[in-house]
Image: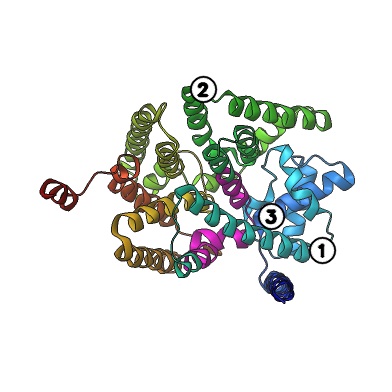
Amino acid sequence: MENRRSVLLVTILSLLVVMAVLGILWANFRFALNNPGGGNFLSAWVGTRYFLLNEWSPYSDQTSQMIKTVAEGSNVVNEDSMFFVYPFYSILLFAPFSLIGNYEIARSLWMMGLQLALLSITGYSLSLTKWKPQIWLVAIFLLFSLFWFHGLGPTISGDASILVTLFLTFALVSIQRENDIAAGIWFALSTIKPQMVALIIPLAVLWTISRKRWRLLTSFFSVTLILTTIFSFLIPNWIFQNLYQILALPANSAIGIPREIFSKWIPGIGNQLGWLLTISLALILIVEWRAVINKEFYWFFWTSSLTLVVTNLVGIPTATDNYVVMIPALVLLVSLMNKRWGRRGSWLILLNLIILLVGLWIIFLSSLEYHGQLLQSSIMFFPLPVYLLIMLYWLRWWAIKPPRVLVDQIRTFIG
């Protein structure tokens, strides 16, 4: 009898999951039909598709012109999306979707993949902290990851930054579980957007050397070399073509550099302020990277979170779509709130999530700029990383060397 009930329960749950997946896919398809866009995915879809079917280099002028043609036909207006700028081996991710001839269907499937990735990022980030919150809080966090500005934005644009974040999260989980070969593989795959991992991978290499975990290093460098070599047989000079394509991006694609933003806001001293910020953050990273050498994983996790935040402020060209990479840092912070303040911490977490969810969308909508089309304001580059930077240092000692609060010390003394 119990076996029958178990089978029935599993069957019902399976049907519900299938219905939910089909419902999400249908909603994504209707959205793709009624809301032209997904420029970041479109360039990858066209570039990969025409390489697979016509052997065109994804970086050729012919491919770039085709991307532009398809974009105009799909009413996608975004100069940055007219180029394929990913490393060549990234087509391994895009190929299954690029073989689908209908762009809207391919986009809807890609969006569903990104949505599932967002849920996975949040779930695995929770496991990194070894925090087991109440079910209602987990549910809220999962919904938050889908609909906050830095989650929904890259989902709609189809940016691969969500997959990079997933790979980085898998790498951190693998390090935590001492599965170093898998960690190296995930780090290698995350290089499909080099600007997102430009600092976290050097940190991982430094920490790995200090811990003498040579398998991680061997795995990372071997997989990266293998991918680069194999795809060099297909296009021998693809690395140089990729670099040329990146340099060919429009000037406004560098708006994510703080000194460029400050120079527009304060023409007189903006550039100097930007350099001051870059130098200050670089010094902070040097101090923290030295401190984490040979330390335990949790300290490394905190430093990794700091590094992922600083990457988007230090002067490396970025975009707000890349800010999804800060989800693990956000999960770390809220877990510390809960561990520190218990039930009160849960309500503080809820308040912070509401502020981030509503606040970021309000800032975005109220600061839209019109230059022939509505464009995101450069102000959006600062709220999340500044908030996380402050919070990471506010909770730093509770993360790596949890102090005993005064009340605990008094109780111990009296006892």
Tag of residue 41 = 3
Q: Residue at x 59, y 45 (%)?
A: 170
Q: Position of residue 48 (x, y in %)?
A: 78, 47
State the residue position of label 2: 212
Main structural element of the magenta stretch: helix, strand or loop?
A: helix
Marks 2 and 3 sit apart, C-alpha to C-alpha, by 39 Å
Q: Residue furthest right?
A: 54
Provide the secondary structure element on which disc 1 rests. loop
* Nearest the eye: 60 or 318: 318
Residue depth check, mark 2 versus mark 1: number of the one nearer the observer: 2
How many numbered circles are shown? 3
Q: Is residue 285 above or below residue 353?
A: above
> For the N terminus, which image quadrant?
bottom right
State the residue position of label 1: 102
Residue range corresponding to the magenta coloring: 140-169
Q: Residue at x 82, y 50 (%)?
A: 49
Tag of residue 53 = none
Q: Position of residue 282 (x, y in %)?
A: 38, 32
Residue type (three-letter) at the residue carrying disc 3: Phe
* Nearest the eye: 148 or 340: 340
Marks 2 and 1 sit apart, C-alpha to C-alpha, by 49 Å
- Decide: marks 1, 3 in contact (CB < 8 A)? no
Marks 1 and 3 sit apart, C-alpha to C-alpha, by 13 Å
Residue type (three-letter) at the residue carrying disc 2: Lys
Residue depth check, mark 2 versus mark 3: number of the one nearer the observer: 2
Q: Is residue 212 above or below residue 203?
A: above
